């Protein structure tokens, strides 16, 4: 990593209260709307996988015992794999609330892979990153036996999952796992966190426990990326100010065309557009994936 001035980060002049307003999207939504969104995640995920061909509960990482679900694979042809990494500020949610796009993608010839990862504070953020990279490695090594094309892996995720998506986009981790540098062919982070230094002063740090050096080392915006895969950086029009600012800074950093700002959506419902084949988000993902069988 290039030398980074740890104390020179966007928003450093804000008060702790102002930073909380920028990044505490649960507070912004309010408890009633937040619970409604979580209910939609659960209900739509259950509907999406009901009767869908799949391979649920596969252990992808022997060290942690964490599991993933494969949905919408099967038939004579291998399918591109959309690996979706859930959000929850690294300390909430699971794969069971995170497969709501599986049926819509299945209809377009794409399989969905949804990993769990050990939540904070039981796991450090470094360990969570290791696990999601291990999930990508599992798809590359073992996906063929489950109907997945190991050469057509696209990674996406929301919020904390957007950060984790970014950590699969950067370089330096693939070779130690015996993976090609271009193992992730494209990426679609939603409302991601790409520079974690502001979080050292936000409530979530009571759980993840970052200091500035660790935050910088875990920030996709600050890490080398010798190969920049095609990406769509998506964010909601009514997202938290911190998430909007991070997406607007990260898109040009990644040579993307600028963030896809989704109108009339907030931090929690923007990702549900992945279940709507008529949405701009869904069309953008299919364009990233490319031709399907």
Image (cartoon, helix red, strand yellow):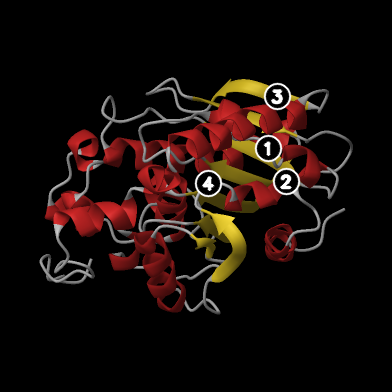
Label 2: element kind = helix
User: Which marked residue is nearer to the observer: mark 3 or mark 1?
Assistant: 1
x, y percent for residue 215: 21, 53
Give the camera-side residue of 112 and 93.
Answer: 93
Judge whether residue 288 can be spotted in this image: yes
Q: Residue at x 29, y 29 (%)?
A: 123
- Determine whether label 4 and label 2 are within 8 Å by CB: no
- The answer for how far apart the CA atoms under marks 4 and 3 are is 27 Å
> Going 71% across and 38% down the picture, which residue do you hit?
144
Label 1, on which residue?
Answer: 100
Q: Tell me the CA gap for discs 2 and 1.
A: 6 Å
CB contact under 8 Å: marks 3 and 1: no
User: If you read the primary sequence from the N terminus, does the residue marked by circle 3 or circle 1 appear first?
Assistant: 3
Pointer 2 with pointer 1, Cβ within 8 A: yes
Secondary-structure class at tag 4: loop
Q: Which residue is mark 4?
A: 268
Identify whether 15 is placed above or below 208.
below
| Mark-to-mark CA distance, 2 and 3 | 20 Å
Which label's residue is closer to the chain start, 4 or 2? 4
User: Which image quadrant: the N terminus?
Assistant: bottom left
Q: Is residue 81 above or below residue 285?
A: above
- In terms of image quadrants, where is residue 90? top left
Residue 190: x percent and y percent? 52, 56
Tell me which residue sits at (61%, 34%) in the image. Answer: 41
Q: Secondary structure at mark 3?
A: strand
- Image height of 111 relative to 20, above or below: above
Residue 217 visible (yes or no)? no
Q: Which mark is residue 275?
A: 2
Whole-percent x, y for residue 33 in the image: 52, 39
Residue under numbered circle 3: 55
């Amino acid at each position: 990593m290039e030398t980074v001035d740890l104390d020179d980060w966007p928003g450093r002049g804000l008060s702790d209260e102002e930073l909380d307003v920028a990044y505490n999207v649960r507070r912004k939504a309010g408890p009633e709307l937040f619970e409604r969104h979580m209910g939609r995640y659960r209900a739509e995920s259950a509907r999406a996988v009901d009767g869908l061909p799949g391979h649920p509960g596969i252990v992808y990482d022997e060290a942690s015992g964490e599991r993933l679900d494969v949905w919408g694979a099967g038939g004579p042809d291998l399918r591109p794999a959309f690996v979706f990494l859930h959000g929850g500020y690294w300390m909430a949610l699971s794969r069971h609330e995170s497969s709501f796009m599986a049926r819509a993608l299945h209809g377009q010839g794409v399989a969905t892979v949804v990993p769990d990862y050990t939540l904070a504070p039981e796991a450090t953020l470094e360990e969570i990153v290791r696990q999601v990279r291990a999930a990508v490695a599992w798809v590359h090594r073992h996906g063929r036996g489950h109907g997945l094309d190991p050469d057509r892996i696209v990674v996406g995720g929301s919020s904390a999952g957007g950060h984790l998506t970014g950590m699969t986009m950067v370089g330096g981790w693939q070779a130690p796992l015996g993976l090609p540098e271009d193992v992730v062919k494209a990426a679609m982070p939603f409302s991601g966190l790409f520079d974690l230094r502001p979080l050292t002063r936000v409530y979530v740090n009571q759980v993840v426990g970052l200091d500035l050096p660790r935050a910088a080392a875990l920030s996709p915006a600050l890490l080398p990326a010798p190969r920049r895969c095609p990406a769509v950086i998506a964010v909601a029009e009514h997202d938290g100010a911190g998430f909007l600012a991070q997406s607007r800074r990260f898109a040009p950093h990644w040579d993307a065309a600028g963030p896809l700002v989704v109108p009339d959506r907030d931090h929690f419902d923007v990702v549900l557009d992945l279940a709507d084949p008529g949405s701009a988000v869904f069309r953008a993902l299919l364009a990233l994936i490319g031709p399907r069988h």
